[in-house]
Amino acid sequence: MRTSIFSVLTGLTFILQLSSCKENSSEVVKKYYSNGEFNGSVLAVKNGKTVCDTALGLSNIEKNIKLEKTTPIYIASLSKSFTAVSIMLLQQKGLLNFDDKASQYIDLPEYARDVSIRQLLNHTSGVKDYESVISDKKGLTNQEVMSWLKSLTQLQFPSGSKFEYSNSGFIILSLILEKISGQSYGKFLNDNIFVPAGMKNTWVYDSSTAHKSRAAGYNKEKKPDDYSILTTGDGGIYSTPEDLYRYDQTLRNFKLINKSNTALMYTPSKLSDGKLSNYGFGWVIEEDGKTVSHTGGLNGFRAIFWRDLHHNSCIIALTNQGDAFPLTDFLKDIKKTIQ
Protein backbone atom coordinates (compact mmCIF):
# COMPACT_ATOMS: atom_id res chain seq x y z
CA MET A 1 0.00 0.00 0.00
CA ARG A 2 2.81 2.41 0.91
CA THR A 3 4.58 1.59 -2.37
CA SER A 4 1.41 2.34 -4.33
CA ILE A 5 0.90 5.74 -2.67
CA PHE A 6 4.58 6.59 -3.18
CA SER A 7 4.28 5.73 -6.89
CA VAL A 8 1.22 7.91 -7.28
CA LEU A 9 2.88 10.86 -5.52
CA THR A 10 6.01 10.44 -7.60
CA GLY A 11 3.93 10.44 -10.77
CA LEU A 12 2.03 13.57 -9.74
CA THR A 13 5.29 15.34 -8.93
CA PHE A 14 6.65 14.47 -12.37
CA ILE A 15 3.52 15.78 -14.08
CA LEU A 16 3.67 19.02 -12.11
CA GLN A 17 7.33 19.44 -13.05
CA LEU A 18 6.46 18.97 -16.70
CA SER A 19 3.67 21.53 -16.42
CA SER A 20 5.96 24.07 -14.79
CA CYS A 21 8.47 23.64 -17.62
CA LYS A 22 5.91 24.69 -20.25
CA GLU A 23 6.55 28.22 -21.48
CA ASN A 24 3.76 30.76 -21.16
CA SER A 25 2.88 33.20 -23.94
CA SER A 26 4.87 36.12 -22.51
CA GLU A 27 7.99 33.96 -22.17
CA VAL A 28 7.72 32.94 -25.83
CA VAL A 29 7.48 36.58 -26.92
CA LYS A 30 10.43 37.60 -24.72
CA LYS A 31 12.53 34.76 -26.16
CA TYR A 32 11.97 35.97 -29.73
CA TYR A 33 12.69 39.54 -28.65
CA SER A 34 15.91 38.53 -26.86
CA ASN A 35 17.02 36.63 -29.97
CA GLY A 36 16.58 39.79 -32.07
CA GLU A 37 13.72 38.19 -34.02
CA PHE A 38 10.83 40.30 -32.79
CA ASN A 39 10.23 44.01 -32.27
CA GLY A 40 6.58 44.90 -31.88
CA SER A 41 3.43 44.12 -29.92
CA VAL A 42 1.52 40.92 -29.13
CA LEU A 43 -1.85 40.05 -27.65
CA ALA A 44 -2.78 36.45 -26.85
CA VAL A 45 -6.16 35.43 -25.47
CA LYS A 46 -7.14 31.98 -24.19
CA ASN A 47 -10.83 31.19 -23.73
CA GLY A 48 -11.66 34.88 -23.38
CA LYS A 49 -8.87 35.59 -20.90
CA THR A 50 -5.86 37.72 -21.87
CA VAL A 51 -2.66 35.76 -21.20
CA CYS A 52 -0.19 38.08 -22.95
CA ASP A 53 -0.45 41.77 -23.76
CA THR A 54 2.93 43.36 -24.36
CA ALA A 55 5.01 45.65 -26.54
CA LEU A 56 8.78 45.30 -26.87
CA GLY A 57 11.41 47.35 -28.63
CA LEU A 58 11.36 50.66 -30.49
CA SER A 59 8.82 52.27 -32.79
CA ASN A 60 11.52 54.55 -34.21
CA ILE A 61 15.15 53.47 -33.97
CA GLU A 62 16.70 56.75 -35.14
CA LYS A 63 14.79 58.76 -32.53
CA ASN A 64 15.01 56.04 -29.86
CA ILE A 65 11.22 56.11 -29.33
CA LYS A 66 9.83 53.21 -27.33
CA LEU A 67 7.13 51.10 -28.93
CA GLU A 68 3.98 51.17 -26.81
CA LYS A 69 0.94 48.88 -26.87
CA THR A 70 -0.99 51.82 -28.35
CA THR A 71 1.54 52.46 -31.15
CA PRO A 72 -0.13 51.85 -34.54
CA ILE A 73 1.77 49.37 -36.71
CA TYR A 74 1.09 48.65 -40.38
CA ILE A 75 -1.02 45.47 -40.66
CA ALA A 76 -0.63 44.87 -44.42
CA SER A 77 -3.00 42.16 -45.68
CA LEU A 78 -4.90 41.86 -42.40
CA SER A 79 -6.68 44.83 -43.98
CA LYS A 80 -8.46 42.46 -46.36
CA SER A 81 -10.85 41.35 -43.63
CA PHE A 82 -11.93 44.96 -43.15
CA THR A 83 -12.55 45.34 -46.87
CA ALA A 84 -14.60 42.13 -46.89
CA VAL A 85 -16.68 43.23 -43.89
CA SER A 86 -17.30 46.61 -45.56
CA ILE A 87 -18.61 44.87 -48.68
CA MET A 88 -20.84 42.68 -46.49
CA LEU A 89 -22.19 45.79 -44.77
CA LEU A 90 -23.19 47.16 -48.19
CA GLN A 91 -24.87 43.84 -49.00
CA GLN A 92 -26.81 43.95 -45.74
CA LYS A 93 -28.09 47.40 -46.72
CA GLY A 94 -29.27 46.02 -50.06
CA LEU A 95 -26.76 48.11 -52.03
CA LEU A 96 -25.12 45.15 -53.80
CA ASN A 97 -25.23 41.37 -54.16
CA PHE A 98 -22.20 39.13 -53.90
CA ASP A 99 -22.86 37.62 -57.33
CA ASP A 100 -23.16 40.99 -59.04
CA LYS A 101 -20.57 41.67 -61.70
CA ALA A 102 -18.00 44.13 -60.38
CA SER A 103 -18.29 45.99 -63.71
CA GLN A 104 -21.82 47.05 -62.71
CA TYR A 105 -20.22 49.52 -60.32
CA ILE A 106 -16.86 50.58 -61.74
CA ASP A 107 -15.15 50.59 -65.12
CA LEU A 108 -13.10 47.43 -65.67
CA PRO A 109 -11.09 46.11 -68.63
CA GLU A 110 -13.17 44.14 -71.13
CA TYR A 111 -11.52 40.87 -70.10
CA ALA A 112 -12.70 41.36 -66.50
CA ARG A 113 -16.27 42.43 -67.20
CA ASP A 114 -17.82 39.19 -65.90
CA VAL A 115 -15.83 38.92 -62.67
CA SER A 116 -18.17 38.83 -59.66
CA ILE A 117 -17.82 40.52 -56.30
CA ARG A 118 -17.84 37.08 -54.67
CA GLN A 119 -14.88 35.97 -56.82
CA LEU A 120 -12.94 39.08 -55.85
CA LEU A 121 -13.62 38.41 -52.15
CA ASN A 122 -12.38 34.81 -52.24
CA HIS A 123 -9.47 35.29 -54.69
CA THR A 124 -10.94 33.21 -57.51
CA SER A 125 -11.39 36.11 -59.95
CA GLY A 126 -8.36 35.49 -62.16
CA VAL A 127 -7.42 39.20 -61.97
CA LYS A 128 -3.62 39.42 -62.01
CA ASP A 129 -1.92 40.39 -58.75
CA TYR A 130 0.01 43.64 -59.12
CA GLU A 131 2.26 43.19 -56.09
CA SER A 132 5.17 41.38 -57.73
CA VAL A 133 5.16 43.79 -60.67
CA ILE A 134 4.64 47.38 -59.53
CA SER A 135 4.38 47.41 -55.72
CA ASP A 136 7.84 48.95 -55.29
CA LYS A 137 6.66 52.26 -56.76
CA LYS A 138 6.62 54.83 -53.96
CA GLY A 139 3.22 56.46 -53.52
CA LEU A 140 1.47 53.84 -55.69
CA THR A 141 -2.30 54.49 -55.84
CA ASN A 142 -5.37 52.42 -56.64
CA GLN A 143 -5.80 54.40 -59.85
CA GLU A 144 -2.30 53.48 -61.00
CA VAL A 145 -3.00 49.80 -60.29
CA MET A 146 -6.20 50.07 -62.34
CA SER A 147 -4.28 51.68 -65.22
CA TRP A 148 -1.84 48.77 -65.11
CA LEU A 149 -4.69 46.23 -65.13
CA LYS A 150 -6.17 47.98 -68.16
CA SER A 151 -2.86 47.52 -69.99
CA LEU A 152 -3.28 43.74 -69.73
CA THR A 153 -5.33 41.69 -72.15
CA GLN A 154 -6.67 38.72 -70.21
CA LEU A 155 -7.38 37.08 -66.87
CA GLN A 156 -4.85 34.69 -65.36
CA PHE A 157 -7.47 31.90 -65.56
CA PRO A 158 -11.26 31.61 -66.04
CA SER A 159 -13.00 33.23 -63.09
CA GLY A 160 -14.08 30.74 -60.45
CA SER A 161 -11.84 27.93 -61.69
CA LYS A 162 -9.02 28.23 -59.15
CA PHE A 163 -7.72 30.15 -56.13
CA GLU A 164 -4.92 32.63 -56.71
CA TYR A 165 -4.24 35.40 -54.22
CA SER A 166 -4.82 38.81 -55.79
CA ASN A 167 -4.20 42.15 -54.12
CA SER A 168 -5.56 43.74 -57.28
CA GLY A 169 -8.94 42.13 -56.63
CA PHE A 170 -9.22 43.81 -53.24
CA ILE A 171 -8.29 47.17 -54.74
CA ILE A 172 -11.26 46.72 -57.08
CA LEU A 173 -13.44 46.01 -54.03
CA SER A 174 -12.18 49.22 -52.39
CA LEU A 175 -13.17 51.22 -55.47
CA ILE A 176 -16.62 49.59 -55.50
CA LEU A 177 -17.01 50.50 -51.82
CA GLU A 178 -16.13 54.12 -52.53
CA LYS A 179 -18.42 54.29 -55.57
CA ILE A 180 -21.48 52.93 -53.74
CA SER A 181 -20.95 54.71 -50.40
CA GLY A 182 -19.80 58.05 -51.77
CA GLN A 183 -17.06 58.03 -49.11
CA SER A 184 -13.35 57.39 -49.19
CA TYR A 185 -12.24 53.92 -48.09
CA GLY A 186 -10.75 55.39 -44.90
CA LYS A 187 -13.86 57.41 -44.01
CA PHE A 188 -16.19 54.44 -44.57
CA LEU A 189 -14.09 52.11 -42.41
CA ASN A 190 -13.74 54.72 -39.67
CA ASP A 191 -17.48 55.43 -39.50
CA ASN A 192 -18.75 51.87 -39.95
CA ILE A 193 -16.09 49.67 -38.30
CA PHE A 194 -13.37 51.45 -36.32
CA VAL A 195 -15.63 53.75 -34.28
CA PRO A 196 -18.39 51.18 -33.60
CA ALA A 197 -15.75 48.63 -32.51
CA GLY A 198 -13.95 51.13 -30.27
CA MET A 199 -10.72 50.97 -32.29
CA LYS A 200 -9.15 54.26 -31.20
CA ASN A 201 -5.65 53.66 -32.61
CA THR A 202 -6.64 52.33 -36.02
CA TRP A 203 -6.76 54.29 -39.27
CA VAL A 204 -6.19 54.08 -43.00
CA TYR A 205 -2.95 55.59 -44.27
CA ASP A 206 -3.53 58.43 -46.75
CA SER A 207 -2.56 62.06 -47.24
CA SER A 208 -4.75 63.14 -44.30
CA THR A 209 -3.32 60.63 -41.81
CA ALA A 210 0.32 60.43 -42.96
CA HIS A 211 1.34 62.83 -40.16
CA LYS A 212 0.01 60.57 -37.38
CA SER A 213 2.33 58.96 -34.86
CA ARG A 214 3.08 55.37 -35.89
CA ALA A 215 5.79 52.74 -35.95
CA ALA A 216 8.42 53.12 -38.67
CA GLY A 217 9.44 50.00 -40.60
CA TYR A 218 12.89 48.34 -40.58
CA ASN A 219 14.64 45.28 -41.93
CA LYS A 220 16.54 42.74 -39.85
CA GLU A 221 19.67 44.91 -40.03
CA LYS A 222 17.58 47.69 -38.46
CA LYS A 223 17.84 49.76 -41.63
CA PRO A 224 14.77 51.85 -42.61
CA ASP A 225 12.26 49.96 -44.75
CA ASP A 226 9.09 51.95 -44.21
CA TYR A 227 5.66 51.66 -45.80
CA SER A 228 5.44 53.97 -48.79
CA ILE A 229 2.41 53.22 -51.02
CA LEU A 230 -1.16 54.54 -51.00
CA THR A 231 -3.28 51.63 -52.17
CA THR A 232 -6.37 50.68 -50.17
CA GLY A 233 -8.51 47.55 -49.97
CA ASP A 234 -5.57 45.19 -50.12
CA GLY A 235 -3.73 46.96 -47.28
CA GLY A 236 -3.27 50.50 -46.03
CA ILE A 237 -4.35 50.11 -42.39
CA TYR A 238 -2.36 50.84 -39.22
CA SER A 239 -3.62 49.28 -36.00
CA THR A 240 -2.67 47.71 -32.67
CA PRO A 241 -3.25 44.20 -31.25
CA GLU A 242 -5.65 45.61 -28.66
CA ASP A 243 -7.75 47.27 -31.37
CA LEU A 244 -7.70 44.13 -33.49
CA TYR A 245 -8.95 42.17 -30.47
CA ARG A 246 -11.83 44.63 -30.16
CA TYR A 247 -12.57 43.91 -33.82
CA ASP A 248 -12.40 40.17 -33.12
CA GLN A 249 -14.95 40.48 -30.32
CA THR A 250 -17.23 42.66 -32.43
CA LEU A 251 -17.25 40.00 -35.14
CA ARG A 252 -17.90 37.19 -32.64
CA ASN A 253 -20.87 39.08 -31.19
CA PHE A 254 -22.41 39.91 -34.61
CA LYS A 255 -22.29 43.64 -33.89
CA LEU A 256 -21.13 44.49 -37.41
CA ILE A 257 -22.33 41.77 -39.74
CA ASN A 258 -25.23 39.38 -39.26
CA LYS A 259 -25.03 35.66 -38.52
CA SER A 260 -25.54 34.50 -42.11
CA ASN A 261 -22.78 36.74 -43.44
CA THR A 262 -20.53 35.74 -40.55
CA ALA A 263 -20.99 32.08 -41.50
CA LEU A 264 -20.33 32.93 -45.14
CA MET A 265 -17.13 34.75 -44.19
CA TYR A 266 -15.75 31.51 -42.77
CA THR A 267 -17.05 29.20 -45.54
CA PRO A 268 -14.56 27.76 -48.07
CA SER A 269 -15.25 28.87 -51.63
CA LYS A 270 -16.35 26.23 -54.12
CA LEU A 271 -14.45 26.20 -57.41
CA SER A 272 -16.03 25.46 -60.78
CA ASP A 273 -14.74 21.86 -60.69
CA GLY A 274 -16.47 21.29 -57.34
CA LYS A 275 -13.29 21.40 -55.24
CA LEU A 276 -13.01 23.72 -52.25
CA SER A 277 -10.55 26.51 -51.60
CA ASN A 278 -9.57 27.21 -47.99
CA TYR A 279 -10.25 30.96 -48.31
CA GLY A 280 -13.55 32.59 -47.38
CA PHE A 281 -14.19 36.34 -47.34
CA GLY A 282 -10.93 37.83 -46.03
CA TRP A 283 -9.86 34.80 -43.94
CA VAL A 284 -7.87 31.61 -44.46
CA ILE A 285 -9.99 28.77 -43.09
CA GLU A 286 -8.31 26.02 -41.06
CA GLU A 287 -9.37 22.84 -39.24
CA ASP A 288 -12.80 22.52 -40.85
CA GLY A 289 -13.72 26.04 -39.86
CA LYS A 290 -12.69 25.79 -36.22
CA THR A 291 -9.93 28.33 -36.69
CA VAL A 292 -9.26 31.12 -39.18
CA SER A 293 -6.22 33.28 -39.75
CA HIS A 294 -4.52 35.80 -41.97
CA THR A 295 -0.97 37.02 -42.32
CA GLY A 296 0.39 40.21 -43.78
CA GLY A 297 3.74 41.56 -44.84
CA LEU A 298 5.14 44.51 -46.75
CA ASN A 299 8.39 46.42 -46.37
CA GLY A 300 9.48 46.33 -42.72
CA PHE A 301 6.19 45.02 -41.38
CA ARG A 302 4.76 41.56 -40.66
CA ALA A 303 1.44 40.67 -39.06
CA ILE A 304 -0.45 37.57 -37.91
CA PHE A 305 -4.06 37.31 -36.76
CA TRP A 306 -5.06 33.78 -35.67
CA ARG A 307 -8.52 33.08 -34.21
CA ASP A 308 -10.05 29.99 -32.60
CA LEU A 309 -13.73 30.47 -33.33
CA HIS A 310 -14.89 27.76 -30.93
CA HIS A 311 -12.94 28.79 -27.83
CA ASN A 312 -12.80 32.60 -28.00
CA SER A 313 -9.03 32.45 -28.27
CA CYS A 314 -6.77 34.47 -30.55
CA ILE A 315 -3.19 35.46 -31.23
CA ILE A 316 -2.30 38.83 -32.73
CA ALA A 317 1.30 39.85 -33.40
CA LEU A 318 2.52 42.94 -35.24
CA THR A 319 6.17 43.77 -35.90
CA ASN A 320 7.98 46.69 -37.50
CA GLN A 321 11.20 44.76 -38.10
CA GLY A 322 9.74 42.58 -40.79
CA ASP A 323 12.22 40.11 -42.22
CA ALA A 324 13.77 39.42 -38.80
CA PHE A 325 10.51 37.78 -37.70
CA PRO A 326 10.08 34.00 -38.30
CA LEU A 327 6.30 34.30 -38.34
CA THR A 328 5.45 30.63 -38.86
CA ASP A 329 7.72 29.42 -36.05
CA PHE A 330 6.46 32.13 -33.71
CA LEU A 331 2.82 31.24 -34.30
CA LYS A 332 3.54 27.54 -33.78
CA ASP A 333 5.33 28.23 -30.49
CA ILE A 334 2.77 30.61 -29.03
CA LYS A 335 -0.18 28.43 -30.06
CA LYS A 336 1.22 25.71 -27.81
CA THR A 337 0.75 28.02 -24.83
CA ILE A 338 -2.97 28.59 -25.34
CA GLN A 339 -4.20 25.25 -26.65
Image: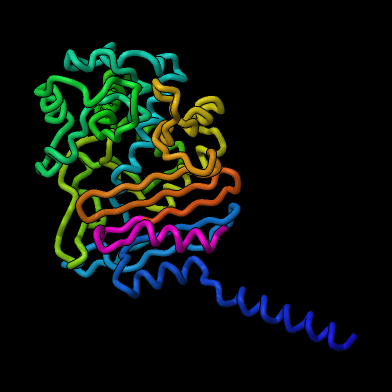
**Image quadrant occupied by the N terminus:** bottom right
Relative side of 196 to 79, left or right: right
Front position in the image: 61 or 23: 23
**Image quadrant occupied by the C terminus:** bottom right
Q: Image quadrant of residue 184?
A: top left
Q: Residue at x 28, y 20 (%)?
A: 158
Relative side of 154 to 94, left or right: left
Query: At which x and y percent is residue 105?
Result: 27, 14
Q: Which residues are magenta?
A: 318-339
Q: Image quadrant of residue 103?
A: top left
Q: Is 165 drawn above or below residue 33 in the view shown?
A: above
Q: Image quadrant of residue 70?
A: bottom left
Q: Residue at x 14, y 27 (%)?
A: 143
How many marks overall? 0
Q: Is residue 39 visible?
A: yes
Query: At which x and y percent is residue 43?
Result: 45, 57
Q: Is 303 drawn above or below residue 145 in the view shown?
A: below
Q: Is 275 drawn above or below residue 296 in the view shown?
A: above
Does residue 328 show up magenta in the picture?
yes
